[in-house]
Amino acid sequence: TLRRAGISSEVISAAGGAGALQSMVSIDEDGSGSGVVTQTQKAPHEIAQVQRALDKNSFFNGLDSDQKKELIAGVYLQVHQKDSVIIQQNASAEGDLDKFYIIKNGRCNVFIDEQKVASLGNGHCFGELALLFSSPRAATCIAATTVSVWCIRGPVFRKVMQRTALQKREQYSGFLKTIPLLGHLPDYEIGVVADALKEVMLEDDTAVVTAG
């Protein structure tokens, strides 16, 4: 019988001690689902792990560096004991279950219709669709070991996307208005162009445009 149990919101330090980083607290602790992002303390290697997980997941390809930084600031740690059901197939991803997960330590097994289809380890992600839709879960994910997961709540993700999208639109629109070729366009058309822009990060000495 599958059971949903053994969940802890205690903070685990790199050395394994509980409560070592007391400022790493759960967000939306009042249960309101307001999507307020609370800055939480994380060690540099923990930030790097979450960053790598977001970079490798195609679901987040459209996010720029500022959006990823806000998401990383809002993640919090949860610990599930071995054999605990983290997400249940066909369960509604609502309320406290409206989360996306990144495995920090441990392993999880994924089942569809009670058939094992995958085994996930450190840095793997699951539950992406909950960030956009409160749709039933497509699979069951069970802790194969005691597992620590970084959690991102759906309301937080949506708030970050909405707020940063508006900020970027204003920033890009202001820049486009300084370009002589585009400066004469009405605000609506400038906004359309701004929405189509995509930020790209380039390494030093990378060729931006090549003749021919």
Image (cartoon, rainbow, N blue to C red):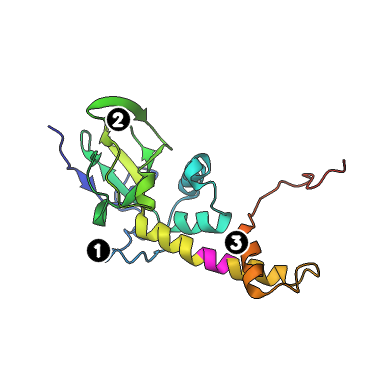
Earlier along the polypeptide chain: callout 3 or callout 1?
Answer: 1
Say few, some or many: other residues with alpha carbon within 10 Å of mark 3 (under 14 / 14 to 19 / 20 or more). some
Q: Quadrant of residue 114?
A: top left
The main secondary structure of the magenta stretch is helix
Q: List the residue tagged with mark 1.
A: 31
Q: Nearer the viewer, residue 159 or 27?
A: 159
Q: Is residue 165 magenta?
A: yes
The percent coordinates of residue 55 (x first, y second) are 53, 43
The percent coordinates of residue 171 (x first, y second) are 63, 69
Task: Please state which amino acid type lies under the numbered disc 2.
Answer: Asn
Report the magenta residues as a range: 164-168
Q: Nearer the viewer, residue 123 or 109?
A: 109
Say few, some or many: other residues with alpha carbon within 10 Å of mark 2 (under 14 / 14 to 19 / 20 or more). some
Q: Residue at x 36, y 64 (%)?
A: 35
Earlier along the polypeptide chain: callout 2 or callout 3?
Answer: 2
Earlier along the polypeptide chain: callout 2 or callout 1?
Answer: 1
Q: List the residue tagged with mark 2.
A: 109
Q: Nearer the viewer, mark 2 or mark 3?
A: 3
Tag 1's secondary structure? loop
Left or right: 46 as drawn, with respect to 25: right
Tag 3's secondary structure? helix
Q: CA distance from mark 3 to mark 1?
A: 33 Å
Q: Quadrant of residue 6?
A: top left
The percent coordinates of residue 71 (x first, y second) are 45, 56
Task: Please state which amino acid type lies under the numbered disc 1.
Answer: Gly
Q: CA distance from mark 2 to mark 1?
A: 28 Å
Say few, some or many: other residues with alpha carbon within 10 Å of mark 1 (under 14 / 14 to 19 / 20 or more). few
Tag 2's secondary structure? strand
Q: CA distance from mark 2 to mark 3?
A: 39 Å
Furthest residue toward right? 212
Q: List the residue tagged with mark 3.
A: 195
